[in-house]
Amino acid sequence: MDKIISFNNRTFQNIFKSGKSYGNKLLVIYYVSNGLDYNRLGITVSKKNGNSVVRHRVKRLIKESYRLNDKKFVKGYDIIFIARVGIENSSYCEVQSALKHLMKKNNLLEK
């Protein structure tokens, strides 16, 4: 099992400034090319989504959805997923579907 690689706060800020973005009902994605042969992942869940237990559950859902589909994604990007308010009531299947939808819309899903 490959480890999901994250990045520091400065990289988060650079991606928000210069990255491309797209959103759907549950998630927003920001991404930028990183020139590496692997993806780096960041997940943000606002306090508006609930208490720490709920926010951590949402992070786990997003991270697991990404991990299980990692082989299908194009490599070489820094990616940030932002959870929208309302995702805390969603099931794993809905989160996975939203994540795949965003990746496909941005041509980050291999054909």
Image (cartoon, helix red, strand yellow):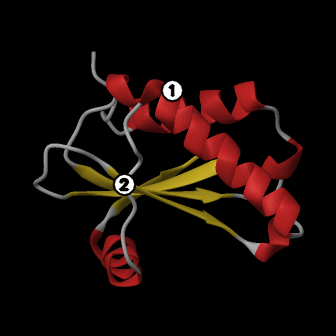
| Mark nearer the N terminus (1 vs 2) | 2
Q: Residue at x 29, y 47 (%)?
A: 39
For the residue pair 36 and 32, the one nearer the viewer reads as 36
Tell me the number on the disc at residue 104. Answer: none
* Residue furthest front in the image: 1
Q: Inspect the image, locate mark 1, and give the three-letter code of the amino acid beneath it.
A: Leu
Q: Inspect the image, locate mark 2, and give the three-letter code of the amino acid beneath it.
A: Ile
**CA separation in Å, label 1 and label 2:** 15 Å
Characterize the local packing of mark 2: few (<14), some (14-19) or many (20 or more) Cα atoms within 10 angstroms: few
Task: Pinpoint residue 10: horizontal percent, then vertical percent.
Answer: 34, 84
Tell me the number on the disc at residue 68. Answer: 1
Please give left or right for residue 44 compared with residue 103 in the image: right
Question: In the rendered view of the protein, which quadrant contains the C terminus?
Answer: top left
Characterize the local packing of mark 1: few (<14), some (14-19) or many (20 or more) Cα atoms within 10 angstroms: few
* Residue furthest top in the image: 111
Question: In the rendered view of the protein, which quadrant contains the N terminus?
Answer: top left
Task: Pinpoint residue 28: horizontal percent, then vertical percent.
Answer: 56, 54
Q: Residue at x 40, y 61 (%)?
A: 6
Tell me the number on the disc at residue 5. Answer: 2
Task: Pinpoint residue 42: horizontal percent, then vertical percent.
Answer: 47, 61
Q: Residue at x 41, y 48 (%)?
A: 4
Above/below status of 19 relative to 33 = below
Task: Pinpoint residue 80: horizontal percent, then vertical percent.
Answer: 45, 59
Q: Secondary structure at mark 1?
A: helix
For the residue pair 24 and 92, the one nearer the viewer reads as 92
Q: Residue at x 31, y 65 (%)?
A: 19
Above/below status of 85 relative to 87 = below
| Image quarter of residue 83 | bottom right
* Residue furthest left in the image: 35
Q: Secondary structure at mark 2?
A: loop
Question: Total of numbered circles in the picture?
Answer: 2
Above/below status of 58 relative to 6 = above
